Image (tube, rainbow, N blue to C red):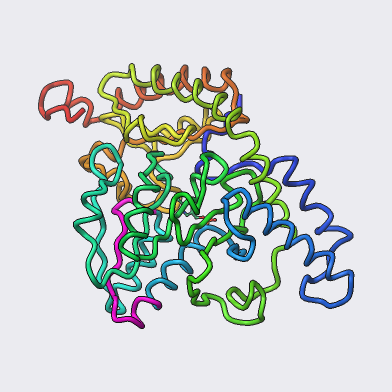
Amino acid sequence: MFVYADNAATTSVSKTALNAMLPFLTEQYGNPSSLYSFGQNAAEALQAARETIAKCLNADPREIYFTSGGSEADNQAIVSAARLGARKGKKHLISTKFEHHAVLHTLNKLEKEGFEVTLLDVHEDGVVRLEDLEAAIREDTALVTVMFANNEIGTVQPIAQIGALCREKKIPFHCDAVQAAGHMPIDVKAMNIDMLAISGHKFHAPKGVGALYARKGMVLTNIIEGGAQERGKRAGTENVAGIAAMAAALEESCANMEENTAKIIPMRDKLFAELGKIPHSKINGSLEHHVPGTVNMCFEGIEGESLLLMLDDAGICASSGSACTSGSLDPSHVLLAIGLPHEVAHGSLRLSIGEYNTMEEIDHIIETVPKVVDYLRAMSPVWDELQKGQRPHLI
Ligand SMILES: *Cc1c(COP(=O)(O)O)cnc(C)c1O
């Protein structure tokens, strides 16, 4: 049995998305910047996609900028707010310890340029506290950037409250909503979000296409210079097929959101309930504030990497830490941010399921994981020491 349980890393392209993109890969190959009607067909498709995406987020179509993905949208949002702030003498940026590297590394770069960065604690439950944010805000704060839902542990942040606070303090608020778009309702107006990043491949569109929402009045800095595409804010001939697919996929995901959630939750809960029975295991992050499909657990005495390889042998695609850091021996910054000791964080497993998964697949995971954990523990010197009482159990 093949089980794809890594939907937080990427998703399959839906039939709807594929059908939406095919015309632009075949007959309709015109350049949307060309003046003849053949090019204008592509321009119209871009405009339709812009309207669809804006509607899904409760934004204005003129507030949507197409990018190459979530990383680029995050980069542009953060750099734009930093440049805007610097012009007013504001060089303080606030974020959280467990953001995606697209955010953290951009902040690092700005720090080297002389910006000051405060990273908020996300506590043991993986949720930012409003009072921590309030205490961190200064006269010279140029940006608050907090992710909607975490990609590793799935916890959801109090975005509407953060938005309200930032609006009150007149500080631009960017939200990396890559894990939430298409999976949870997003309303940029009601939530007072000034900038927001989404990525097509996390909701059944192809990889390499995303969007930045920037509220009217936000001044954007270009990351890519060149032609006048995207109202002069993002150069480069648009990925028309990808953009059309992204709009179709987001529209479909939003239309089916309740139905998909109702399908995913029982599968996720079964995973939590059954895998939680494994001795010395731990569920990471609050279950109360959570995206539907992501399950993150730690098993004491084993290495996440070995677990993944053995699950792969059983046909199961899962993840440990983030895809970007796998291969390195450092434990995930997200798991360290929620206070897990290094040795526990090393034994982590992320299963992220979607509406295309079935209960049979969940049962296959539930049958396989405990066996693999037992097998790896039997070979683990650390587990041996734990059993003999030579080191204390941490979970
Ligand atoms: C996947 C992801 C990104 C990066 O998006 P890409 O389109 O792959 O560049 C950024 N933030 C979060 C939370 C993600 O999960």
Residue 254 horizontal side relative to residue 79, left or right: right
Residue 7 horizontal side relative to residue 12, left or right: left
Quarter containing the N terminus: top right
Q: Is residue 361 shown in magenta?
A: no
Q: Is residue 184 above or below residue 1?
A: below
Q: Is residue 242 above or below residue 126?
A: below
- The answer to which of 310 and 13 lies nearer the viewer is 13
Q: Position of residue 14 (x, y in %)?
A: 70, 41
Q: Position of residue 349 (x, y in %)?
A: 39, 34
Q: Residue at x 40, y 42 (%)?
A: 152
Residue 18 horizontal side relative to residue 264, left or right: right
Q: Is residue 20 above or below residue 33?
A: above
- The answer to which of 11 and 198 lies nearer the viewer is 198
Answer with the quarter of the image where residue 343 lies. Answer: top left
Q: Which residues are magenta?
A: 84-99
Q: Residue at x 58, y 64 (%)?
A: 63
Q: Is residue 95 shown in magenta?
A: yes
Q: Position of residue 334 (x, y in %)?
A: 32, 47
